[in-house]
Image (cartoon, grey):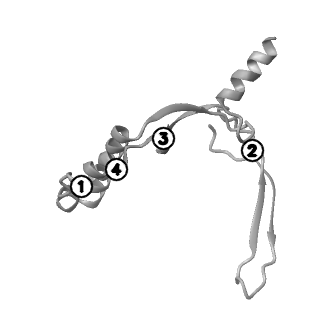
Amino acid sequence: MSDHIHVLYADTLDVDEHISDHKGIYVFIDFTETFNSCYKRKAWNYARADFDSLNNLIENTNWDFIETCDVNTSCIQLTNVIYEFMNQCIPSKEVSMRPYDRPGYDSEIRKHTRHRDRL
């Protein structure tokens, strides 16, 4: 990726003096960057979560590391502990995200669409 941005047009806007004592700026840029049309992410099934086990894990964990470490280390450790608890108690699966799909167009509909097209 280049650090050069091709500016198509730029100008200033007058802003009401009660809002700001500066002018507003707007810029139109040539944005031709391509994005991956599909990516994967983890989807949690909270409806099937075992919240009793999750609560037990939280209650029976020694949280002293939060006070004994610096704030950055504590934050990382806390995040890792909670993420591990979630992995143990909440079912999940990896799903493919397609940003250009219509809302609700999921893998089940996609499967039927492919079947229809093959027929």
SS class of the residue under badge 4? helix
Q: Which residue is mark 3?
A: 44
- Residue 31 marker: 2
- Residue 19 marker: none
* Residue type of the residue flagged with mark 3: Trp
Q: Quadrant of residue 13?
A: bottom right
- Residue 79 marker: 4
Q: How many marks?
A: 4
- The residue lying at 33 percent from left, 38 percent from top is 88
**Image-based side of 94 in relation to 116, left or right:** left
* Residue type of the residue flagged with mark 2: Phe
Q: Which residue is mark 1?
A: 59
- The residue lying at 74 percent from left, 18 percent from top is 114
* Residue type of the residue flagged with mark 1: Glu
Marks 2 and 4 sit apart, C-alpha to C-alpha, by: 36 Å
Q: Is residue 35 above or below residue 66?
A: above
- The residue lying at 30 percent from left, 52 percent from top is 55
Lower position in the chain sequence, tag 4 or tag 3: 3
Nearer mark to the viewer, of 2 and 3: 3
**Image-based side of 100 in relation to 83, left or right:** right
What x and y, as percent, mark residue 54? 32, 48
Marks 4 and 3 sit apart, C-alpha to C-alpha, by: 16 Å
- The residue lying at 66 percent from left, 34 percent from top is 98
